[in-house]
Image: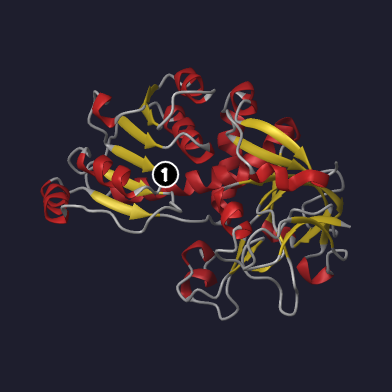
């Protein structure tokens, strides 16, 4: 069968690979691949910057943002043939560490976790894949192809959970939210902020394309310069990973404000920062910075609820391009106006 493949560690090896049928060791539920989303992690895997395949395998099947349709499900699994599902990415380590033992594999302490389509395990970017029912989340039929947004939305439901945990250390009633970066992660962060009734302000370096109107349709303001921000944010969701943006946004935090770092930049590792001044601002304001990555099962379930509560036509506008599996490497080249690009695994 066909699949989205790369040779781990080899740049430029993205191809439409021929792979064997998914092994039963991957799970008792057989799923037909419907869509796979492309994100920055996939770009880094294709660039050979990280990633690892199964032991003895010379290629890795990509695709951690998934949507599939159940072909076969075991009795008592809670799934039936025809159900739409999204597969969870991370798997707990085999030991397991205390976090993995309680279902919080997104907080794995020893790094021995595996990840579908990223680390050790093949992903969901194939015509068929298998999954253990426990690591699958039902996608309501009314979401249809929008179910491919469940995985990226789970990153944000976790991010907001972490913001609430940290903010709850004292009196906590946020009103203004700044989101930096208007890619899929930033826009989904803004969506959740709007659903919560917060004032939404989104920063992006370009005001071309559909992003500004998507933000405005949430009732938010769109900025290309932090100097134009007219409020002091209680919460910042940082989705660029760009050091200068992180520093400047952190300086703007309100007293007891929380910044959640959800982005990683492929750019330079080093910037010049007056850390003593920044630290002073954070300390005297009781502000907090927290990083977040990946998601646990409950975050996927929450993500489904977020998507169901959203305007479906707004969500449709996030998916700006669909490419066939037969030409999936073309999804890696960004085009003007692209937000979320997905691969049609049936084409």
Task: Choose between 58 and 193: the one closer to the eye.
Answer: 58
* Left or right: 102, with 343 as reference point: left
Residue 344 placement: quadrant:
top right
Relative to residue 221, is residue 102 depicted above or below? below
Q: Which residue is mark 1?
A: 240
- SS label for mark 1: loop
170 vs 156, left or right, is left
Q: Residue at x 60, y 78 (%)?
A: 94
**Quadrant into which the N terminus falls:** bottom right
* Image quadrant assignment for residue 135: bottom right
Applied colour scheme: secondary structure
> Residue at 70% of width from left, 66% of height from top?
7
Q: Is residue 52 left or right of residue 239?
A: right
Query: Residue 324: x percent and y percent?
Result: 80, 40
User: Which of the pair 212/235 is nearer the observer?
Assistant: 212
- The x and y percentages for residue 16 are 80, 54
């Amino acid at each position: 069968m066909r699949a989205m493949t790369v040779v781990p560690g080899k740049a430029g090896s993205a191809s439409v690979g021929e792979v064997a049928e998914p092994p039963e060791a991957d799970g008792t539920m057989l799923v037909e691949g419907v869509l796979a989303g492309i994100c920055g992690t996939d770009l880094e895997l294709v660039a050979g910057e990280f990633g690892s395949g199964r032991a003895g395998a010379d290629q890795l099947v990509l695709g951690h943002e998934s949507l599939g349709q159940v072909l076969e499900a075991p009795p008592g699994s809670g799934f039936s043939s025809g159900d739409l599902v999204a597969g969870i990415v991370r798997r707990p380590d085999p030991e397991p560490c205390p976090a993995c033992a309680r279902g919080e594999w997104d907080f794995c302490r020893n790094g021995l976790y595996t990840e579908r389509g990223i680390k050790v395990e093949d992903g969901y970017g194939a015509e068929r894949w298998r999954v253990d029912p426990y690591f699958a989340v039902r996608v309501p039929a009314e979401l249809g192809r929008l179910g491919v947004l469940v995985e990226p939305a789970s990153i944000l439901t976790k991010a907001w959970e972490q913001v609430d945990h940290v903010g709850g250390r004292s009196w906590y009633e946020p009103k203004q939210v700044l989101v930096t970066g208007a890619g899929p992660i930033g826009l989904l962060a803004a969506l959740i902020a709007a659903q919560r009734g917060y004032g939404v302000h989104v920063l992006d370096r370009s005001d071309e394309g559909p992003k500004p109107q998507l933000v405005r349709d949430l009732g938010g303001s769109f900025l290309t310069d932090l100097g134009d921000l007219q409020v002091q944010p209680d919460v910042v969701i940082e989705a660029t990973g760009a050091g200068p943006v992180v520093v400047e946004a952190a300086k703007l935090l309100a007293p007891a404000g929380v910044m959640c770092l959800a982005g990683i930049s492929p750019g330079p590792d080093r910037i010049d920062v007056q850390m003593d001044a920044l630290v002073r601002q954070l300390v005297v304001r009781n502000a907090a910075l927290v990083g977040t990555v990946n998601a646990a099962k409950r975050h996927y379930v929450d993500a489904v609820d977020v998507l169901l509560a959203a305007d479906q036509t707004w969500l449709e506008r996030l998916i700006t391009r669909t490419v066939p599996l037969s030409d999936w490497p073309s999804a890696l080249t960004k085009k003007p106006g692209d937000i979320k690009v997905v691969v049609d695994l049936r084409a």
